[in-house]
Image: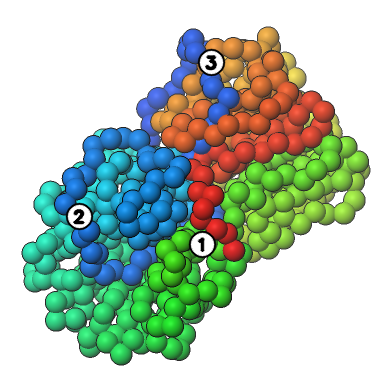
């Protein structure tokens, strides 16, 4: 992984994690543009009461990771041309059941894809660009990258799916893989490489389809990283090329049987079954365990390998247990975002680490407010106590003691207003959240570098990095404040909307007119007008700013290009980047809704909570969780 401050490659794309993180933080405009800004409600259709999956930017992503070996071709059946993902119901071939796999691979975002024994593909995890919706057909192997994946069909041709999430320089966001027949494919961060049936290598940039430099010679395996690749030649020596980030292309001498490249960390298994790693070392990333191994999967901050005895060993940074494999016999292991998965000796799959399904499991009880974030949520009970749940990284999901009148879950921490009006925050202090000022407040909108609060006298205060435009609070008297990423909005006492901060897609261009409530997401905002009509503005590349006709009680502009609402009949609906894999929204009736990064929660009229995953394709029931 390229770290902040390391040299960018000349004349090529930004590393994906820098691009996306900077976009979400509102720090850059190039490469993040969308020209669509909507007006008042013009659509005639009502949003469906269902939802689905964009890139996490507030947590550390995992690198594409898979040990590269030559896949076995099992038949001559042609690759299908359908668009739909195969059904997760019982598909059985002569070689095994649909619940068993022949290959499995994870990517840097929460996305895992597998080839089942009948040759069909299935994926689960983030699906904002269709990356979890594989094509029909029969395949022998699969490789998952940042926001797309590729597989080799039983006819040895390549099929790729997913998309680059933002247009760059007006060029296509999707690219076709090269033609021909192949034995091996590896999808990296911004490049992909494959080994042709004649042993030569082919590499290309996924965003444009442009060719990436490829050395001559023949290979038996290949693995792609962030702007570089490593290949295992037919004489079993290693050759790496491309950007030499942290020494990633400085391959050791010797003979090897497997190689796996992460973002800028590479590991290989030599002919003596020993692990050798080089490149970036994230807290032990290249300090490998002892023993003999048959395969290895390198992630961004953690890696795992299968020993010759079938056991799995993991090393590196281990948040939420993704480096704690179960005691079982494995044939393959892969790393993904906050989780790891492996194929067991019986062909079934199991995963461990952070279970994203837990985000949709709210506590019992009755509540007055609910607020969702990336990996955690918080709610204010009718007893004035705060309850938080989700990933408890650095205490962000800890429930503080005492009584509160307001609570908001931010990216890596949470803030609340205590009953006497002071602001109290808890969670990951290592990110240095803005220290709240003294005084009494009615509401708070916490951000990563700047936070804002509504004082008792109706004035808005902002604190943190004074150099950022988000710190320029407007004058006047307000009844609410919302935001926290790249833009904030306030509702004036005359019902007009005022927004400030970074703007690229018109995020701060709040429309004129009277509003009852406002919600500011990362790059778009929405408001409910007096009378219940909806009005949205800002970035609209996924239709998240479409102001769909109807009357509404509540709206939440999500942090990652989708919007959720509560209609006047109490039903909830979401649209935008949730469209690829619609999820059923629980029954209401609801009075409020909060859209987070991968999930949303609604507050029912009776005070109970209901949550659902929004941008994630479901993990099959037959993939077990440890």
- The image shows residue 312 at horizontal and vertical percentages of 48, 76
Q: Which residue does the numbered mark 2 point to in the structure image? A: 75
Left/right placement of residue 363 relative to residue 85 reads right
Mark 1 burial class by Cα count in 10 Å: few <14, some 14-19, many 20+ = some
Left/right placement of residue 35 relative to residue 556 reads left
Quarter-of-image position of residue 347: bottom left
Dot 2 or dot 1, earlier in sequence? 2
> Which of the numbered marks, if any, corresponds to residue 73?
none
Q: Residue at x 26, y 79 (%)?
A: 257
Q: Is residue 173 above or below residue 434?
A: above
Q: Residue at x 30, y 90 (%)?
A: 272
What is the CA distance from the residue labelled 1 to the residue labelled 3? 39 Å
User: SS at mark 1?
Assistant: strand
The residue mark sitting in front, 1 or 3, is: 1
Q: In the depicted view, which residue is nearer to us: 159 or 136?
A: 136
The residue mark sitting in front, 2 or 3, is: 2
What is the CA distance from the residue labelled 2 to the residue labelled 1? 27 Å
Mark 2 burial class by Cα count in 10 Å: few <14, some 14-19, many 20+ = some
Q: Quadrant of the C terminus?
A: bottom right
Dot 2 or dot 3, earlier in sequence? 3
Q: Residue at x 50, y 25 (%)?
A: 545
Q: Quadrant of the N terminus?
A: bottom left
- The image shows residue 241 at horizontal and vertical percentages of 21, 70
Give yes or no for contact between labels 2 and 3 (Cβ–Cβ under 8 Å).
Answer: no
Dot 1 or dot 3, earlier in sequence? 3
Q: Is residue 114 above or below residue 478?
A: below
Q: Which residue does the numbered mark 3 point to in the structure image? A: 46
Mark 3 burial class by Cα count in 10 Å: few <14, some 14-19, many 20+ = few
Label count reads 3
Q: Which residue does the numbered mark 1 point to in the structure image? A: 350
């Amino acid at each position: 992984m390229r770290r902040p401050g390391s040299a960018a490659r000349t004349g090529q794309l930004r590393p994906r994690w820098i691009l996306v993180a900077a976009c979400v933080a509102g720090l850059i405009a190039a490469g993040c543009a969308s020209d669509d800004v909507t007006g008042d409600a013009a659509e005639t259709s009502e949003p469906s009461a269902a939802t689905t999956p964009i890139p996490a930017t507030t947590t550390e992503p995992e690198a594409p990771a898979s040990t590269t070996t030559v896949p076995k071709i099992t038949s001559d059946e042609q690759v299908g041309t359908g668009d739909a993902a195969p059904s997760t119901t019982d598909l059985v071939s002569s070689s095994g059941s649909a619940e068993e796999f022949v290959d499995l691979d994870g990517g840097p975002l929460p996305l895992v894809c597998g080839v089942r024994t009948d040759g069909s593909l299935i994926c689960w995890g983030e699906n904002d660009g269709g990356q979890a919706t594989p094509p029909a057909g029969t395949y022998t192997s699969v490789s998952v990258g940042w926001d797309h994946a590729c597989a080799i069909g039983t006819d040895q041709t390549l099929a790729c799916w997913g998309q680059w999430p933002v247009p760059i320089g007006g060029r296509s966001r999707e690219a076709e893989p090269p033609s021909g027949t192949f034995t091996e494919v590896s999808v990296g961060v911004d490049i992909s490489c494959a080994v042709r049936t004649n042993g030569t290598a082919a590499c290309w940039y996924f965003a444009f389809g442009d060719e990436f430099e490829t050395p001559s010679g023949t290979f038996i395996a290949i693995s792609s990283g962030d702007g570089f690749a490593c290949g295992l030649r037919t004489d079993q020596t290693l050759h790496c090329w491309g950007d030499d980030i942290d020494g990633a292309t400085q391959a050791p001498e010797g003979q090897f049987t497997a190689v796996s490249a992460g973002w800028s960390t590479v590991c290989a298994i030599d002919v003596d079954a020993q692990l050798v790693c080089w490149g970036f070392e994230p807290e032990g990333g290249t300090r490998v365990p002892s023993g003999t191994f048959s395969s290895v999967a390198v992630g961004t901050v953690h890696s795992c390998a299968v020993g010759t005895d079938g056991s799995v060993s993991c090393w590196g940074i281990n948040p939420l247990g993704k480096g704690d494999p179960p005691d079982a016999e494995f044939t393959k292991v892969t790393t993904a975002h906050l989780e790891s998965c492996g194929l067991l000796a019986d062909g079934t799959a199991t995963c461990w680490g952070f279970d994203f399904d837990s985000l949709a499991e709210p506590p019992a009880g009755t509540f007055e407010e609910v607020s969702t974030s990336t990996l955690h949520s918080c709610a204010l009970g009718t007893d004035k106590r705060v309850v938080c749940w989700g990933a408890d990284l650095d205490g962000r999901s800890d429930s503080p003691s005492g009584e509160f009148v307001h609570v908001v879950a931010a990216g890596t921490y949470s803030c609340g207003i205590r009953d006497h009006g002071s602001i109290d925050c808890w969670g990951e202090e290592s990110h240095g959240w803005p220290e709240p000022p003294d005084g009494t407040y009615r509401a708070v909108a916490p951000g990563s570098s700047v936070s804002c609060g509504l004082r008792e006298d109706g004035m808005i205060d902002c604190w943190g990095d004074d150099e950022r435009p988000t710190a320029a609070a407007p004058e006047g008297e307000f009844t609410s404040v919302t935001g926290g990423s790249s833009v904030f909005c306030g509702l004036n006492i005359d019902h007009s909307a005022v927004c400030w901060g970074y703007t690229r897609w018109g995020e701060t261009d709040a429309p004129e007119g009277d509003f009852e409530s406002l919600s500011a997401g990362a790059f778009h905002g929405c408001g409910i007008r007096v009378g219940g009509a909806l009005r949205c503005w800002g970035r609209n590349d996924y239709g998240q700013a479409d102001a769909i006709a109807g009357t509404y009680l509540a709206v939440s502009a999500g942090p990652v290009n989708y919007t959720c609402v509560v209609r006047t009949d109490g039903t909830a609906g979401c649209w935008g980047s949730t469209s690829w894999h619609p999820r059923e929204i629980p029954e209401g009736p609801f009075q409020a809704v909060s859209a987070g990064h991968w999930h949303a929660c609604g507050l029912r009229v009776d005070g109970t909570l209901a949550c659902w995953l929004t941008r994630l394709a479901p993990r099959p029931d037959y993939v077990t969780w440890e």
